[in-house]
């Protein structure tokens, strides 16, 4: 597969080029030049074959000829080593739990797959690759766990001191090995500035081999098709159309859903379910796209005012509003509605959802209200409720059970290195690293 830029002003590249670069040289995002449909017979087979085999078949056209089959098989089987669980709350409402990976959020799919792919792509390099990540919370842990123990790659995570929760901090500062966490005396913006400055520092880039692992990387999107196939395998065969509600921030998750639909999975419509940072639902309603600074909410992993995958959504619909509207319907929920929905779902079904998943359920409810014809809803559950224990407790009055994995992690000692927010200190650290 060749990859092109959404801006269409950069040379085509291979999967290797797209993954190691992240962003195209013209500032666009990489897209596969084509997305081939699987035949109905192949789709039928997807229900019967082992899940690893199906994931392999789904991603293979996107990775050929860059990645040899045996390597791709290893990447898929090592990355996706945890289950996707479908919970049916009612005959018409299903929850797809994507949070059974090491950091209890769906970002494990993308991060674990991309880390192993990068590990393969740098095998022929003599210098180790240093992956830089600035995090305000959750991305850091998924990326750190994804790359843990991958040979030839070091990860340096920058996070703002005292501005993230203890549970978030412990998830990426206790790992050791090839993961280093820098505790920056400053804000998240300082962390991002330091990373950006490092990438544009010609002198440093002569000495160090740097890359990034943020959510615009195509290597993170491809494996996000896998769980749509998992849903297809587990959902009861129904004669009514399927509506998939995706709790969204940067819209990587929803973009991957459209990829999955284009390879042939039966989805009638996607719901772009956001919190009050609703620039995309607003665009779908009015045709006007107005990025703005993000507002803090309970579903903080979706506090995004200028979603970085928006150009991909437009690209998939040839930038025509009516085509985007055909594929996606949008809904933004307030914090109050989110809390109430968490309580309603708990009381009605005995099911505890985290605030992001609750936003997804609200998106489905709103869609159904406006489109009262028969349909079944699938809501992607993006995080384990224990990751947002405070909000859950506020909503339902009791704390969600703490998974063993998180409890063990909280007991470990923090290994981060304190650093100032001055670029020279960061550069010195990277040069000596
Ligand atoms: C990152 C994240 C999202 C948003 O996903 P996008 O791909 O950025 O739209 C939703 N929920 C949780 C829990 C997340 O961590």
Image (cartoon, grey):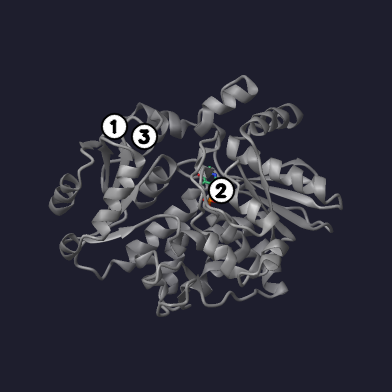
Asked if residue 41 can be seen in this view, the reply is yes
Q: Are marks 2 and 3 in contact (CB under 8 Å)?
A: no
Where residue 228 sits: x, y (%)? Answer: 63, 57
Where residue 155 sits: x, y (%)? Answer: 29, 51
Identity of the residue drawn at 21% across and 38% down: 419
Q: Are marks 3 and 1 in contact (CB under 8 Å)?
A: yes
Comes first in the chain, label 3 or label 1: 3
Where residue 299 sits: x, y (%)? Answer: 55, 37
For this orientation, the residue located farthest to the top is 397
Where residue 380 sits: x, y (%)? Answer: 63, 47
On the rendered structure, is 24 left or right of 194?
right
Q: Determine the secondary structure under disc 3.
A: helix
Asked if residue 78 can be seen in this view, the reply is no
Determine which residue is flagged by label 2: 83
Picture layout, residue 174 above or below residue 117: above
Which class describes the residues within 10 Å of circle 1: few (<14), some (14-19), or many (20+)? some
Q: Determine the secondary structure under disc 1.
A: loop
Determine which residue is flagged by label 1: 414
**Is the residue at mark 2 in contact range of ligand 1, meaning its CB lies under 8 Å from it?**
no
On the rendered structure, is 43 left or right of 129?
right
Numbered circles on residues, count: 3
Picture layout, residue 340 above or below residue 231: above
Determine which residue is flagged by label 3: 169
Which class describes the residues within 10 Å of circle 3: few (<14), some (14-19), or many (20+)? many
Of the pair 219 and 83, the residue shown nearer to us: 219
Picture layout, residue 355 above or below residue 158: above
Comes first in the chain, label 2 or label 1: 2
Q: Determine the secondary structure under disc 2.
A: loop
Comes first in the chain, label 2 or label 3: 2
Rendering quarter of residue 34: bottom right
Q: CA distance from mark 3 to mark 1?
A: 8 Å
Q: CA distance from mark 2 to mark 3?
A: 25 Å
């Amino acid at each position: 597969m060749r990859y092109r830029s959404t801006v269409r002003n950069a040379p085509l590249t291979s999967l290797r080029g797209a993954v190691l670069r992240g962003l195209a040289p013209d500032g666009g995002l990489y897209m596969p030049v084509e997305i081939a449909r699987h035949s109905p017979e192949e789709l039928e087979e997807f229900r019967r074959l082992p899940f690893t085999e199906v994931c392999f078949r789904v991603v293979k056209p996107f990775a050929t000829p860059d990645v040899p089959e045996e390597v791709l098989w290893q990447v898929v089987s090592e990355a996706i080593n945890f289950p996707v669980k479908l919970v049916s709350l009612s005959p018409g409402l299903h929850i797809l739990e994507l949070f059974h990976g090491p950091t209890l959020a769906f970002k494990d799919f993308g991060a674990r797959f991309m880390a192993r792919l990068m590990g393969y792509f740098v095998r022929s390099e003599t210098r180790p690759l240093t992956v830089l990540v600035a995090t305000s919370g959750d991305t850091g842990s998924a990326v750190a766990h994804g790359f843990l123990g991958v040979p030839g790659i070091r990860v340096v995570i920058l996070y703002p001191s005292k501005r993230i929760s203890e549970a978030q901090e412990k998830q990426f500062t206790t790992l050791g090995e090839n993961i280093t966490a820098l505790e920056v005396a400053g804000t998240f913006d300082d962390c991002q500035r330091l990373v950006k400055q490092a990438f544009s520092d010609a002198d440093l880039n002569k000495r160090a081999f740097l890359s990034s692992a943020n959510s615009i990387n195509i290597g993170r999107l491809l494996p996000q098709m896998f769980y749509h196939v998992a849903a297809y395998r587990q959902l009861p065969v129904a004669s009514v159309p399927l509506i998939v509600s995706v709790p969204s921030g940067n819209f990587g998750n929803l973009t991957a859903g459209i990829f999955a639909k284009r390879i042939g999975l039966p989805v009638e419509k996607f719901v772009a379910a956001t919190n009050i940072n609703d620039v995309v639902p607003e665009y779908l309603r009015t045709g006007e796209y107005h990025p703005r600074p993000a507002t803090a909410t309970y579903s903080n992993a979706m506090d995004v005012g200028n979603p970085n995958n928006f150009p991909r959504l437009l690209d998939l619909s040839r930038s025509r509003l009516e085509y985007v509207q055909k594929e996606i319907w949008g809904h933004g929920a307030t914090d109050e509605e989110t809390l109430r929905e968490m309580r309603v779902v708990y009381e009605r079904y005995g099911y505890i959802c985290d605030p992001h998943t609750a936003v997804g359920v609200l998106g489905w409810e709103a869609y159904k209200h406006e489109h009262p014809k028969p349909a079944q809803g699938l809501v992607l559950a993006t995080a384990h409720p224990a990751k947002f224990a405070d909000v859950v407790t506020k909503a339902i009055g009791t704390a969600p059970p703490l998974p063993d994995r998180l409890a063990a992690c909280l007991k470990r000692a923090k290994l981060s290195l304190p650093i100032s927010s001055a670029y020279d200190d960061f550069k010195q650290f990277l040069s000596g690293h």
